[in-house]
Amino acid sequence: MTSTTPTRIKTIAEFHRLRGLPKPEHPLISVVNLDTVGYLENNESASLILDFYFIAIKRCLPTKFKYGQQEYDFDEGVMFFIAPGQVFKIEVEPDSTHKSSGWLLLIHPDFLWNTALAKTIKQYQYFDYSVN
């Protein structure tokens, strides 16, 4: 997956397949235990664009994230939110002995269709980053 061109992941099922997870029980929403998520191939870095919302609560993460133009250090843990269409980069620390733990909530925008949340979610600033 190492590339300067971001990899677009269009569906939650595709995310599951790429991370070695079983097929999601629902095509538009998924809750994932990080203990079950496979690492990137050869612990390589990857730039990704997801076509769904990605909410994560993680601990002991041997990974660095670049979100927007800012790099974040999440060694002690993190809660973060990514909206569809945003680019972020994951860099796994080589030879890390830490196993991350936590949860992912993946929500396709169609799941929210015709709800009050679908109409207001863009005003929640934690789903957006500013370009520096």
Image (tube, rainbow, N blue to C red):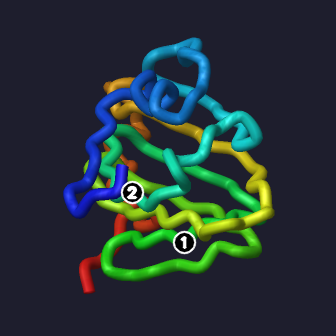
Q: Which residue type does callout 2 highlight?
A: Ala
Q: Residue 27 location in percent, x, y?
A: 45, 17
- Residue in the foreground of this view, choosing between 4 and 108: 4
Image location (x, y in percent) of residue 93: 60, 69
Percent across and percent down for residue 69 are: 32, 80
In the depicted structure, whether residue 91 falls above or below residue 122: below
Give the class, few, some or many, for how many residues have Cα within 10 Å of label 1's Cα (few <14, many ≥20). some
Q: Which residue is mark 1?
A: 64
Quarter of the image holding residue 98?
A: bottom right
Element carrying mark 2? strand
Q: How far across and how far down the image is residue 106, in percent?
A: 51, 36
Which residue sits at x=64%, y=73%?
74
Q: Amino acid at mark 1?
A: Lys
Q: Secondary structure at mark 1?
A: strand
Q: Is residue 124 visible?
A: no
Please name the residue shown 68% across and 55% down the image. Answer: 57
Residue at (47, 58) in percent of width and height: 44
Q: In the image, is 64 to the left or to the right of 13?
A: right
Residue that label 2 marks = 46
